[in-house]
Image (cartoon, helix red, strand yellow):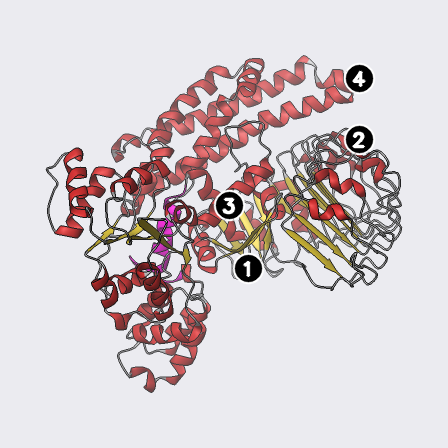
Amino acid sequence: MAAETFVFNIAAKVLGKIGSPAFQEACLVWGVENDLNRLENTLSTIKAVLLDAEDQQVHNQELTVWLGQLKEVFYDAQDVLDDFECEALRRQVVEIQGSTTRKVRRFFSSSNSIVFRTKMAHKVKEIRARLDEVAADKDKFHLSQRSDNKHLVRGREMSYSFVQASDVIGRDQDKEQIVECLMHPTDDQKVSVISVVGIGGVGKTALAKLVFNDARVVHHFKLKGWMCVSDEFVLKQLLVKIIRSITSENCNDLEEEQLQMRLRNILDGKKFLLILDDVWNEDRVKWIELRNLLMGGANGSKILVTTRSPTIASMMSTMCPYNLKGLQQEECMSLFIKWAFDEGEERQHANLVEIGEEIVKKCKGVPLAVKSLGSLLYSKLDERDWRFVKDNEIWKLNRKEGDILSALQLSYNQMPSYLKQCFAYFSFLLKDYKYNTLDLIPFWMAQGLLQSPDENQEPEDIGNQYVDELFSRCFLEDYSDAGYFRLFKIHDLAHDLALSIAQSECLIMNCQTQNISKKVWHLSYYDNTWQDENILKCLQKSKSLRTIFSPIEGVGLTSESFIDACLSGFKYLRVLDLSDSCFEVLPSSIGTMKHLRWINLSKNEKMKKLPNSICKLQNLQTLLLDGCEKLEELPKDIRYMISLRWLSITTKQKSLPRAWNSLRNLALFNCGNLESLSEILQGCTGLLRMLIIDSCGGMISLIPTLKFLTSLEVLAIENCEKLDLTEGEDNQEEFPTSLRALSFSGLPQLVVLPEWIKRSAKTLQSISIQSCPNLTTLPEWLLNLETLKKLIILNCPKLWLEDHSEVPNVPS
C-alpha cells in the first residue's frame, strides 16, 4: 500500500488560513466563528501527532488508511475556506465597480448574505463533524507529538571503514585526488577539512573507505578515526563516537566536560585523520563547537566529510568541496554485471547483457542504482524479466531496503514539510529537460505551496529559495542562478523518487487507465489517447480534482465534450491546462471556476476571443495566451482580475486594456499591431518585475512606459524592427534601478546602448546582445557595472572596440 504523504503540510495550511487575522475578521461577519474555532481546536490536536503518524505508517497499514481519511477531510476543508476567500475577493471587485448600481445593491442585499452565510455554515458544520469522526481513532495509534522544526533525523544504517577494493569500480582517479589533498601540507590551516559531496548512492562512502585504507594514508597519519554521523548532531554523542573510533575506548559514562578533556589529550600534538561520514547537520554553530575541539592535533591533520548537501560541504570545508560525479557507462556496466551475474555467467547470455546496457542508462552513473537493478535481476535469466526492468520506471520496480530509492528517500525525509509537497510536483515534469522557475513557481503558487513568515515577501522570491534549497540537497543538476529566476534540470533518479512519492494522489493518464480513485487530486497526461467517455465517467468521481496538466508541448485536450465536462464538473480546479486545444471560443462557463489560479490557453490557433466571464476569476494568478495567433482582443474587464500576476499573450490589438496592479510579469509574443504598453501598465508600473517583448513589429518606443518601471528586474526585447530604445531618454533619473538581466536581440534600430542601463549598475548581473546589425560601439561605462557576471555579444558585425579591433562574435 502506498504511503500517505503531505498530510501534516495540508493541515498546517488549513490552520494557517483559519488563524489569519483577515479570515478571523471575516468569520465574525459571516457568523461561523464558533464552528471554525472548534474545527481549529480539533485540527491543532491532530496536527501535533501527524509527523509521527507519517513516519510510523511504514509499519502500520491501518495508520495509512487513517491518514488518507484525514487528508481527504483536510482538502475538503481547504476548499470550504477558499470559498470564503473567493467571496471576499468577489465583494472587493464589486466595490471597485461602484456602489451605486442596482447590480451592486442586489449583490449586497441581506437575502444574498443570508443565503451565503447559511450555505457556508452548513459546510463548516459538515467538515467539523467528519473531522471529529476521523479524529476519534487517533488515540488507538499511540502517537507522539512533534513539531516540524524537530523532525526526526534518521540517516542510513551506520557505516564502517572496511572495503574490498575490488568491489569499488571507477573511482581510482577520484581516490588519487583526495589522497593528494590529504597528504599535501596546508600552511594556513592547522587542521584542514575536505568535503566530498554528491547525490545519495553516488559512492561518497565507498570513496572515503578507499582513501581511509590506502597504505599511503595509513602511514602518513599517527591517528585515524572513522565515524558515521548520520543521526542527530549531538556533541556528547559525537565525542563518545570519535574517542571510540580512534582508541576503541568506551566512554559512555563520562560527562561532556570529561569527554572534551579526553579528546584533547588524545589529539594533542598528533597528526590525525578523521572521517565524518554521512553528515546531515546544517547548524553551523554546532559544527564550530565540534571543530574547536579538534584543533589540538599537529599541523597537517585532516578531516574528511561526506555529505549530500553542498550547503553543508561549504559550511564545513576549509577548501573547495569535491563534487563526486557519476560513473561512465562502461564502468557502470562492469558494476552491473558484477551484481546481476555469477562470475563469467554473462558470457553465456549476450542477449541479457545487451538489454542490460539499456537498463544501466536509467541509472545515470549512480553506483547504488546500478547495484539495485543488478541485484533485482540476479539469478533471473528470463528475457521477459529483464525487459520489464528496462521498460519501467525505477519507482515501479520492487523496492527493498537499501536500494537507490530508499537512499534518496533519506534525503527527502530530511526536508521540512513545506518543501516535500513542492518536490512531489516534480513528478509532473519531464526528465532531461531544462526548466525555468518562471514556469514552475506559478504552478506551485496555484496550489498554495509557497509559505513565508514575512507577509511582504514576493511569492516568486520564496519559490526561488525553494529551488535553491532543492539544489542544495542534490536533487537538481545543470543549475544556474539568473537573479530573478533559476535554470535547472531534475536529476533522473530524483524524478523517479518524486513519482514514487506522488503516486497516492497524482495520476498520469493514458489509454490503459481504467481504475481511477476518487482520491486523485492531480491529473497529468502525455498524449491524447485517453480522452473518451468511459474515462470521463471515472474521473467524475473525483469531484475535488485540483489539477489537469500536460508537460508535453503540442498535446492538448481535443475533445470538446471533455473540455465542457472539465468546466462544469471540476469546480475546485486550481490548475487547468487547455493549451493546444480545439475551440474557437472559450466556453463562457469558465467564469464559474472561481478557485482557478493558473490557466494555460496558449497555442489555441483557432481561438478568436475570450468570454468576458473569464474576468470573474478573481483568484486567477497566471493567464497564458501566447501563440493564440487569431486572438482579436482581451476582455475589457480584465482589470477586475485582481490577483493576476503573470500574463503572456499574442493578440492583434494595438493597445491592451488596463490590468490590475497585481501584475508582476508581462510577456508579449507576435503582437504585430501593438504600439503602446502605457494603458495595460497603468497602476502597476512600480510593481512590474519582468517584461518580455518578442516580435512586436509595431512598437516604436518603449521609453514613456519604461521610465516608470522602477522595480523591473528582467527586460528582454527581441525582433522589434522599429523599436528605438534611446529616443526620449533625456532624464536619466526616471529609469529602472533594479535590473538584473537584460537581453536585446534582433533590434536593427539599436546603434548604441541606452544610457539608462547605467541606472542599474549595482544590480545588473547579465547582459546579452545578439543580432543587432547596426550596433557600432560599446560605452566605457559598461566596464563599470559592479555586479555584472555575464556579457554575451553575438552577431553584431558593425561593433568595434575603441582600439578599432573588431569584437569577436563569441560570448565574453
Q: Residue at x 26, y 80 (%)?
A: 343
For marks 1 and 3 on the same chain, the one whose residue lies earlier in the sequence:
3
**Residue 773 placement: quadrant:** bottom right
Callout 4–callout 3 Cβ contact below 8 Å: no
Query: Residue 593 at x, y = what percent?
Result: 65, 37
- Magenta segment: 396-415
Distance between the alpha carbons at the discs numbered 2 and 3: 34 Å
For disc 2, the marked residue is: 682
Where's residue 701, x and y in %? 87, 43
Nearer-N-terminus badge (2/4): 4
Percent position of residue 364, x then y: 45, 65
Relative height, residue 24 to residue 191 (above, below): above
Please state which of the two labelled residues, at mark 2 or mark 4, is closer to the viewer: 2
Question: Dot 3, crowdedness within 10 Å: few (<14), some or many (≥20)?
Answer: some
Q: Which mark is residue 352?
A: none
Query: The residue tagged with tag 2: helix, strand or loop?
Result: loop
Q: Residues within 10 Å of mark 1 (few under 14, many from 20)?
A: some
Q: Is the C-beta separation of discs 4 and 1 under 8 Å?
A: no
Instruction: Please say whether residue 553 is one of the residues in the magenta stretch.
Output: no
